[in-house]
Image (tube, grey):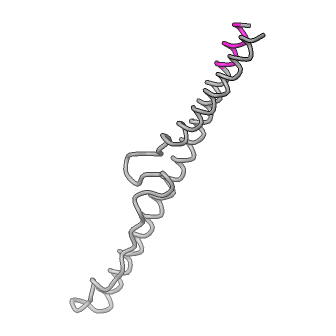
Amino acid sequence: MNLLTAQHQVNLRLGDIAYRDKLTKMGDRAQQKLVGMQSQADREYEAARLAAIQRDGSQANLGAIPQRTLPGSVGGVSGGSGGFNLSGITGAIGGFFRGIGNFFGRLIRSL
């Protein structure tokens, strides 16, 4: 019985690790997409500025050209070096797994 309980706890931990890894990879992909979108917006802004300077010379009104800035965070993905925030998700998952572990632990002890 102790072996079954230990094996169950190990399986729960391995599942939790795999799930965290999957969420982190999803966050990394979203982070890369956000950075790519901002780079594209910056290139478009610079192209518009250059076109205005070529067209109007020193009379170009560069302040009238809109500069698109994406938000620093989208769905838990930080625009900076913060990465993907898992604290709320993993806390809920950890509580769920602890509850399951406690249930099976009590069930096995009652047998």
Place of residue 58 in the rendered image (x, y in percent of width and height, measured from the top left): 21, 89
Left/right placement of residue 12 relative to residue 50 reads: right
Relative to 21, say whether 110 is above or below.
Answer: above
Place of residue 42 in the rendered image (x, y in percent of width and height, measured from the top left): 38, 69
Place of residue 89 in the rendered image (x, y in percent of width and height, measured from the top left): 55, 42
Task: Kindly give the residue lying farthest to the right in the view shown.
Answer: 111
**In magenta stretch: residue 5:** yes
Magenta range: 2-10
Residue at the image point whose x is 31% and y is 86% from the top: 64
Q: Which image quadrant: the N terminus?
A: top right
For the stretch drawn in magenta, what is the main secondary structure?
helix
Residue at the image point whose x is 54% and y is 50% from the top: 29
Left/right placement of residue 8 relative to residue 59 reads: right
Relative to 91, say whether 78 is above or below.
Answer: below
Relative to 51, say whether 45 is above or below.
Answer: above
User: Which picture quadrant has residue 9?
Assistant: top right
Relative to 33, say whether 97 is above or below.
Answer: above
User: Which picture quadrant has residue 39?
Assistant: bottom left
Left/right placement of residue 32 relative to residue 53 reads: right
Q: Which image quadrant: the C terminus?
A: top right
Residue at the image point whose x is 41% and y is 63% from the top: 71
Q: Nearer the viewer, residue 33 or 70?
A: 70
